[in-house]
Image (spheres, helix red, strand yellow):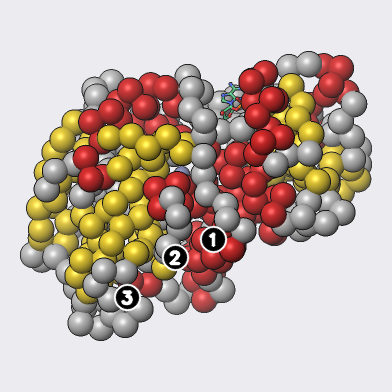
Amino acid sequence: MSTITVKAFGTEAQDKPLHSMDVQRRALMENDVELEILYCGICHSDLHAIKNDWGGTAYPIVPGHEIIGKVTKIGSKVSKFKEGDLAGIGCIVDSCGHCHQCNDGEEQFCEEGWTLVFNAPDKHLGGVTYGGFSKHIVCDANYILKIPEFENLGAAAPLLCAGITTYSPLKHWGAGPGKKIGIIGIGGLGHMAVKIAKAMGAHVTVFTTSPDKVEDAKRLGADEAVLSKDQEQMAAQKGYDMILDTVSAKHDVNAYLNCLTVDGSLVLVGLPNEPLDVGAFNIVSGRKSLSGSIIGGIAETQEVIDFCYKHNITADSEIIKMQDVNEALDRLEKGDVKYRFVIDMASLSN
Ligand code: NAP
Ligand code: ZN
């Protein structure tokens, strides 16, 4: 199969900084679209993968799954896009397209396995897929999203992962008027969850370990903010219908199970690399659920993009140059970002 050479940033080892490299992508096929990448967000999943936190990282890795770009080429059978359109790519770049889950628009549960945009087996070229820390990308049009003219385009890139990953469970568990929703961990995902849950009409409480984020929570739209290290404040939290847990490291979930109402759900989206301890009594009393959710399907990703455009929601973003990515990853590890780094890909030469 013919290939094209594109500029990217990646690393050969978990303890080596990311640097400029060339990678091969497939040449355009009839159902494909080529994008020039304009912006790519940095998610904690990129950091987990670079550091091999979950095991299974194949090096060299080129991360990045919150991609916004401009269409530069279209395959002969593509009608959804034309050259010059704005377009987005999130986590999913392929799936079987015919199983029950794919037919239901839940490609994230594809029974034959879906393909992650980076560090997943590449069905076409062998090796692994390379993500959005790159100048160009080629992808099947069915997995590409339409992007409206956001005023701050770079700040819309995080909708492709942080947006859909929080929108999907909030919608599934019925966040809306009359519902009391908690959001744990105010990072990239958490701050999007606050904005989206408020736009859905829910009462929103932030649970944070960071005193400065207690101050900032109201600005983000939260009705209440709780410092989770303060046991007195935590003991007063009751009656939550759903609590969305976006924390990236091991933490105590039992304290949050105790905040739920009868039949309430604690929903994990954060992916710590260590198992969490759950006390049975904290679940059985009140018939509570501990659940989880992973990104969302392509149709629902389009839905969250359109929802956020309508409600004027984007991520609070710190736009950086590609060359500053290692410093940004160090700061993300320390929790020093309010609330998402986004790379301006114009800084990566052709
Ligand atoms: P992030 O920006 O680093 O935010 C994580 C937040 O968790 C931090 O800002 C901090 O919030 C809190 N936190 C971090 N370490 C903690 C600790 N030891 N104890 C308690 N709280 C802690 O990360 P992100 O990009 O939002 O991603 C969050 C997690 O979701 C990651 O594990 C990522 O891999 C995962 N993820 C999952 C999916 C999915 O589909 N399920 C999709 C994307 C990402 P406070 O300062 O407010 O306490
Ligand atoms: Zn992500």
Q: Amino acid at mark 3?
A: Phe
Q: What residue is shown with label 2?
A: 148
Q: Amino acid at mark 2?
A: Pro
Q: Give the structural element (helix, strand or loop) at label 1.
A: helix
Say if disc 2 is inside 8 Å of ligand 2.
no
Instruction: Left or right? Give the position of 126 relative to 47.
Output: left
Structural distance between the alpha carbons of marks 1 and 2: 7 Å
Structural distance between the alpha carbons of marks 1 and 3: 19 Å
The vertical placement of 34 against 261, above or below, is below
Q: What residue is shown with label 3?
A: 81
Residue drawn at (28%, 35%), measured in percent from left and top? 321
- The answer to whether the residue labelled 1 contacts the one labelled 2, judged by CB atoms less than 8 Å apart, is yes
Residue 98 visible in the snapshot: yes
Image mark for residue 309: 1
Structural distance between the alpha carbons of marks 2 and 3: 13 Å
Say if disc 3 is inside 8 Å of ligand 2.
no
Q: Amino acid at mark 1?
A: Tyr
- The answer to whether the residue labelled 1 contacts the one labelled 3, judged by CB atoms less than 8 Å apart, is no
Choose the circle earlier in sequence order: 1 or 3. 3
